[in-house]
Image (cartoon, grey):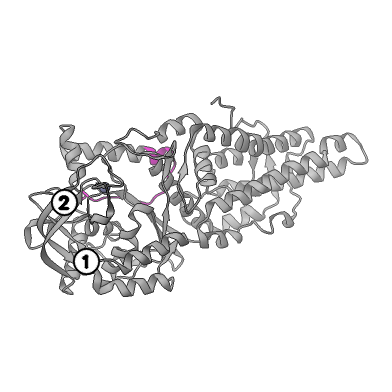
Amino acid sequence: MSQKKFYITTAIAYPNWKPHMGHALEIIIADTLARMHRMSWKEVEFQTGTDEHGIKNRRTAQKEWKDILEFLDENVSAFQDMYKKLKVSYNTFLRTSDKDRHYPGVQKIRKKMADKWDIYKQSYNGLYCAGCESFKTEKDLVNGKCIDHPNQKIEKVEEENYFFKLSKYKDQVIDLIKNEKYKIFPEIRKNEMLTFLENSRDVSFSRPKSSSPWGITVPDDENHVIYVWCDALSNYLTGQWYGLNENWKNTRPADLHIVWKDIQRFHAAFWPAMLLSADIDVPKELLAHGFLTLNSNKMWKSTGNTIDPMEAIEKYGRDPLVFNLLYDVPSDWDWDFSMSRLNNVYNSMLIGSRWNLVNRVTKLSEKFWITNGKLWKNENWFKDFNMNTINDFLKNHDTKWYLEKRYHLVQKANEYITKEEPWTKYKDDSAKAEAVECLEFLLYIVKNLTVLSAPILVESFEKIKNILWTDILNWLTTDTNGSFEVREKAFNTTDFNVNIQSEIIYPRIEE
Ligand SMILES: [Zn+2]
C-alpha cells in the first residue's frame, strides 16, 4: 500500500441475533466514508466482522438447543446477507471464532503486554451484567439494574481474574486525546472520554473458564479465557494478519474506527492503552455515532422494539435507505427512525427533486436532438462543492453536511430550468441556440451531481450512467481502489452521449 492508504473499520458486530437497523446505520456510515476516501485518492482497506465469543452468545445458543458454531454461522450469514444487499464494499471480514487467523494474534498481543508486566492476577469481587458482558459499579446501576438491560439480573461475582494496568497508561492516553493525536468525533464524546479516563481503574482482562468457557484460552493458564476487550479489540490487528506475518504493518496506524457510542470507552481508553503497552501505533481517529430509536425507545431484541432493515431495503431499495439515514441522523445524537419518514424522503427528495431533475433534462435532450457533443461548463456552480471539497468534508466525516450541499444544488438546478424555460425558447428561432446551450449546461450539472453522489447513491449511479453515458463515466467506480485519474476526468469531462431509452430509476411507492 502507498502512503495514501486509509484503514477504516466498523466495530465487529455481536451476532447473537439478526442485524437490526442500528447495524445498518453503522455499516452505511463506514461504507460511504470508505467510498469517499477511494474517490479522494486513497488506497482503502475497509474491515468489518463479528465478535463471536462470550457468555451471551453461548447462552442464547443453548436456549435454542444449537451447537455454538451452528448458531453463529446462521447469524453471521444474516449479517453478510444484509451487507450484500447494502452493497457494502468491505475488503476484509473477520470472525473472532476464526482459530487460524484470529487466535494467534490475540495471544501474541497479550504476551507482549504480559512481558511488560502490564497484566497481573488478582481476586475480584464485582457486579456483573451478562447483557453488557462487563462489570458494573453501584453507581452504574439504577434501582440495582443495568440501564441498558433492565430485565437482566445483575450477578454478584467473586473470582480470580487477570487485570490490565490501564492506570499505567491513562495519562498518556489523556494527552493523546487532548492533543488530538487520537482524535475523537464528535466533540461531546471526546469530553465524556476524558472524564471517563480521569476516573478509570485497571481493566479485567480474563474470565475463569468455569463461568465463561467460550473463548480463547489464556496462554500458560488453562483455567482462564481471554476477556472480550483483548479478544474483540485485537480484531483490528488480526484482520490484517497480526501474529501470522508482517502485513499488518501496512495499515498502521489505523486511520478511523467507527463505533456505537456505548462501546466508545473501550476504543477511546482501553485500546490505545493496550497498543501503547504492546508498542504498536495508536489509531488516528475514532467516530462514535448515536443509536437509532424506534418510537423514541432504544431498539432492543429483548423488548421486540426493532425494525428489520431487510424489509426497508426490499421495499425501497438500498439507495433510499442509505440516503435517509445519512441525511437525517445527526453525528452527535440519537435519531428516531420511521418507515413513514423513509417514504417521505423517498417520494419528495429522491423522486420529487433528484429524479425529476434527471428526467426533465434527459427528456428535453431527446426533444432538442441533443444526444451527443460537448457540455457547457460553468465551474461557478461547483465552486463550493467539487472533487477538492470532498477532502475538506472528509476531515470531519460529516456525511449529512455533504448530502445537504448536494441536495441544495439539485434544488438550484430545478429552479434554474423552471426560470429559464428552455422549452419555450426552443420554439423561437432567435432563442433556439440559447435553449440548446441551457440544456448542455443542465446536462453538465446532472453529470457532475451524479459523479459526486457515486459513493452514496451507488445503485442509481449505475443506472444514471447508462442514461448519461460518457466513456469516462463508464469507468468510474467507488467499489474498489485505483483509477484515481478516472474520478478527476469524470468530473471535468465535457464529452457526452445521452441514451434516451431511459428507465425510471425511482418508481412511486405507497407508504
Ligand atoms: Zn447491561
For this view, does 168 lie left or right of residue 376? left
User: Is 1 in front, or is 146?
Assistant: 146
Which x, y percent locates residue 202?
Answer: 21, 66
User: Is disc 2 surrounded by few (<14), some (14 to 19) or many (20+) residues within 10 Å?
Assistant: many
User: Is 434 in front, or is 146?
Assistant: 146
Which x, y percent locates residue 450?
Answer: 61, 46
**Vertical relation: 430 (above or below) 347:** below
Which x, y percent locates residue 167?
Answer: 24, 71
Ligand 1 within 8 Å of disc 2? The answer is: no
- Depth check, mark 1 against mark 2: the one in front is 1
Label 1, on which residue?
202
For this view, does 199 lie left or right of residue 28? left
**Vertical relation: 301 (above or below) 243:** above
Label 2, on which residue?
215
Q: Amino acid at mark 1?
A: Asp
For this view, does 209 lie left or right of residue 461? left
Residue 146 numbered mark, or none: none
Label 2: state its secondary structure: loop
Q: Is residue 96 magenta?
A: yes
Q: Is residue 111 magenta?
A: no
Q: Residue at x 61, y 30 (%)?
A: 504
The quadrant of the rendering that contains the N terminus is: bottom left
Q: Amino acid at mark 2?
A: Gly
Sooner in the amino-acid sequence: mark 1 or mark 2 = 1
**Vertical relation: 328 (above or below) 311:** below
Q: Residue at x 57, y 33 (%)?
A: 344
* Viewer can see residue 471: no
Label 1: state its secondary structure: loop
Q: Residue at x 17, y 64 (%)?
A: 163
Find the magenta span and give its range.
82-98
Hey, which quadrant is residue 492 in on the image? bottom right
Name of the residue lying farthest toward the front = 143
